[in-house]
Image: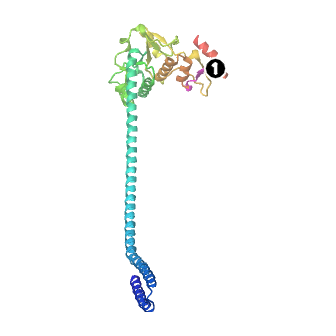
Amino acid sequence: MKGTMVERETEKSEHSLSCGMSKGQHKSEDPHICGEESSSTQEMFELLRIDVDSETLKIPRTDSQDSSCSRNVLRKQKNWEKTLAAKKGKRREEKQRRKLKRIEESGNMLQSSQHSKRVVKAITKERLIEAKTVGPRLCIDLSMTDLMSHKEISRLAGQIRRLYGSNRKAANPFHLYLTGLREDGLLYKECLRKNDGFLNYVMDVTEDSWLDLFPLDSVIYLTPDSEHALEHVDPDKVYILGGLVDESIQKKITYQKAMDSCVCTARLPIQEYMVKKTNAKNFHSKILAINQVFDILLTFCETQSWPEALKAGVPPGKGYVLYGESAPDAHLCAESALETL
């Protein structure tokens, strides 16, 4: 519309100019003037053409720019949507990858933990097997079950379990024997019932008597009624512990059995390193469970110190403490000394 109006105005200008030229020709026929008028007229025509061209070209260019701009916006929007979708996909993949990694790491930790347990178990078993060759020897005499009640036999089975547990943990374990254990006896059944894996214990278990297994001159029977205090643990000797839980306090049963078998005896040096301590019940006892005696022997073999071994193994309830740990009870040392005479 605008271009049409411009064209009409151009036509009017040309017409007026042509009229002016005709009139000027009648008025003046000077060639110089006519030349100037013709040149100025051409310049005007050129300017008019330029304006017309520029106006006519502006309209279609504006439409093309709008359409190209719309296409750019759509293209950018599509690219942005693709980028967002790609980022979401990457986040999902990363989340899944971290989840799988956590599962894998937890599985590796569990496998490593299980592997460590297997390794420790294998090392422990190897150490116990080696002790059968180089370790000191300790035998539990289980031939006195006929002197015990059902409850006492059950307690003895528990002591055997704790004794074996201490030996497994020891850096230098003993070579253990269980003698006089009959498979048809109540103690054997209690050991199977109370001790998990009893049949896999790394120790020598037999129905035979210790008298048939060891030379008598190599045996030392440990009994609290012996007159001789144990000074050291000799690797060439076999130490016998009487497997007896006696709640009725039958005295000197194991000592008498050792005397009848003509073997040497010894006791733990409790009265040499410990004194009686006053307590509410005025109770004092040197009778220890077989696992407590064994813990004292293990500690002595590791430390070569009877005070440390006795302090670690003698329960406080027995009424004894080391010398120097109970100054108010120093007068009781004299009683202990008199009892040894």
Asked if residue 196 lies in the magenta stretch, the reply is no
Q: What x and y, as percent, mark residue 226?
A: 50, 12
Q: For the point 45% across and 13% down, which residue is it?
A: 221
Asked if residue 322 lies in the magenta stretch, the reply is yes
> Residue 20 versus residue 137: which sits nearer the camera?
20
Rendered position, 218 above or below 106: above
Q: Which residue is mark 1?
A: 324
Q: Quadrant of the C terminus?
A: top right
Q: What x and y, as percent, mark residue 144?
A: 40, 19
* Residue 45 appears in the rendering: yes
Specify few, some or many for label 1: CA neighbours under 10 Å numbering under 14, 14-19, or 20 or more: few
Instruction: Specify the farthest residue to the left.
Output: 184
Magenta residues, start to end: 316-323
Rendered position, 82 above or below 65: above
* Residue 143 appears in the rendering: no
Q: For the point 39% across and 71% down, which residue is it?
A: 65
Is 200 left or right of 237, judged from the image as shown? left
The quarter holding residue 150 reads top left
Q: Amino acid at mark 1?
A: Gly
Q: Quadrant of the N terminus?
A: bottom left
